[in-house]
Amino acid sequence: MDMDAEDAQMFMEELGLTERGLDRLIKTSYELLGYISFLTAGPDDVHAWTITKGTKAPKAAGKIHSDIERGFIRAEVVAFEDLKACGTMANAKAKGLFRLEGKEYVMKDGDIVNFLFNV
């Protein structure tokens, strides 16, 4: 933990490790507990929300605020890996990777979502 990034990378390479122990612990814990994360993004911040695997979009929206769950219309969704490959939300939309999902959509780990609702 006290090593600078370069020394830590060399240390991990020498041991044949691809990720830090803490990262592995967190991933394994999430898997054992049946959790996944979805993200919301605005102009100033990105927020990760933890939900149980199999959660449908309206219930996931309720993690943010009960009004969003109650007034759920649809979810605008792009997978994190797709957005990372495209670089921008506009590029993801242009490539058809941006989807509109309804009330029966089961959230996936790494979804980036904008919930549309009306209360």
Image (spheres, rainbow, N blue to C red):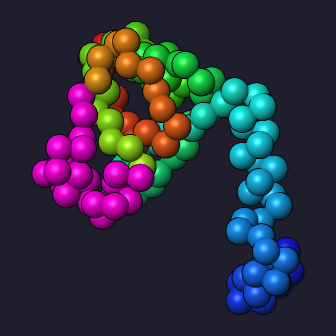
Q: Residue at x 42, y 49 (%)?
A: 80
Looking at the image, can residue 10 be seen?
yes
Q: Nearer the viewer, residue 1 or 7?
A: 7
Q: In terms of secondary structure, what is the magenta stretch mainly?
A: helix
Q: Residue at x 44, y 21 (%)?
A: 106
Image x and y of residue 118, in percent: 27, 16
Q: Residue at x 37, y 37 (%)?
A: 113
Seen in the image, is 20 located left or right of residue 119? right
In the rendered image, the residue lying farthest to the left is 94
Q: Nearer the viewer, residue 30 or 115?
A: 30
The image quadrant where one finds the N terminus is bottom right
Image x and y of residue 54, in percent: 55, 19
Is residue 75 located in the magenta-colored stretch of the structure? Answer: no
Above or below — where is 76 with respect to 68?
A: below
Above or below — where is 16 with respect to 101?
A: below
Q: Nearer the viewer, residue 107 or 115?
A: 107
Above or below — where is 17 with respect to 88?
A: below
Looking at the image, can residue 65 be seen?
no
Q: Residue at x 29, y 23 (%)?
A: 101
In the rendered image, the residue lying farthest to the front is 16
Range covered by the magenta-colored residues: 81-100
Picture quadrant of residue 98: top left
Image x and y of residue 35, in percent: 66, 30
Is residue 93 located in the magenta-colored stretch of the structure? Answer: yes
Image x and y of residue 45, in percent: 45, 54
The image quadrant where one finds the C terminus is top left
